[in-house]
């Protein structure tokens, strides 16, 4: 409420926002794939590696949600 309203002529999705979204998605994918490949390296391909990748995907989302609460305020 303390900030002025955004310019109505400004785009809702800016280049900066799009790049940030792509960067965050890339980090999420890198984290999940690294967990999967780590599991494949240590236990071989199969259901355990898939389960570890799924667990990494599920556990990273609360951290991502905390990070996405605000563009101005961090953790």
Image (cartoon, rainbow, N blue to C red):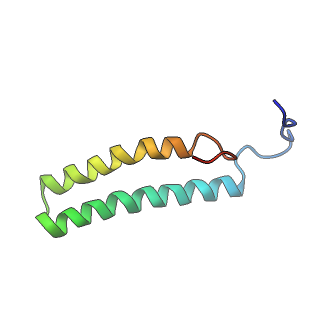
User: Picture coordinates of residue 20 (x, y %)?
Assistant: 61, 56
Residue 16, quarter of the rendered image? bottom right
- Does residue 26 appear left or right of residue 2 in this picture? left
Left or right position of 7 against 46: right
- Check the image and report above or below for 27 versus 56: below
Residue 66 picture location, percent across and down? 52, 42
> Looking at the image, which residue is at 87% across and 41% down?
7
Q: Nearest the camera: 47 or 10?
A: 47
* Residue 66 in view: yes
Total numbered badges shown on the rendered structure: 0
**Residue at 57%, 44% in the rendered image:** 68
Q: Residue furthest bottom?
A: 41
Q: Can residue 44 be seen in this view?
A: no
Placement of the N terminus among the 4 image quadrants: top right
Q: Nearer the viewer, residue 23 or 63?
A: 63
Residue 38, by quadrant, is: bottom left
- Residue 30: image quadrant is bottom left
Q: Residue at x 85, y 35 (%)?
A: 5
Q: Residue 25: x percent and y percent?
A: 49, 55
Q: In this view, does 43 lie above or below 60?
A: below
- 63 with respect to 5 (left or right): left
Q: Residue furthest front?
A: 75
| Depicted 56 relative to depicted 42: above or below | above
Q: Where is residue 41 in the image (x, y as percent from the top left)?
A: 18, 70
- Residue at left 73%, top 43%? 12
């Amino acid at each position: 409420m303390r900030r002025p309203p955004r310019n109505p002529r400004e785009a809702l999705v800016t280049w900066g926002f799009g790049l940030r979204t792509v960067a965050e998605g890339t980090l999420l994918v890198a984290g999940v794939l690294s967990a999967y490949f780590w599991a494949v390296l240590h236990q071989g391909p199969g259901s355990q590696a898939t389960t570890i990748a799924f667990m990494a995907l599920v556990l990273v989302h609360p951290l991502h949600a905390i990070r996405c609460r605000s563009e101005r305020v961090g953790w």
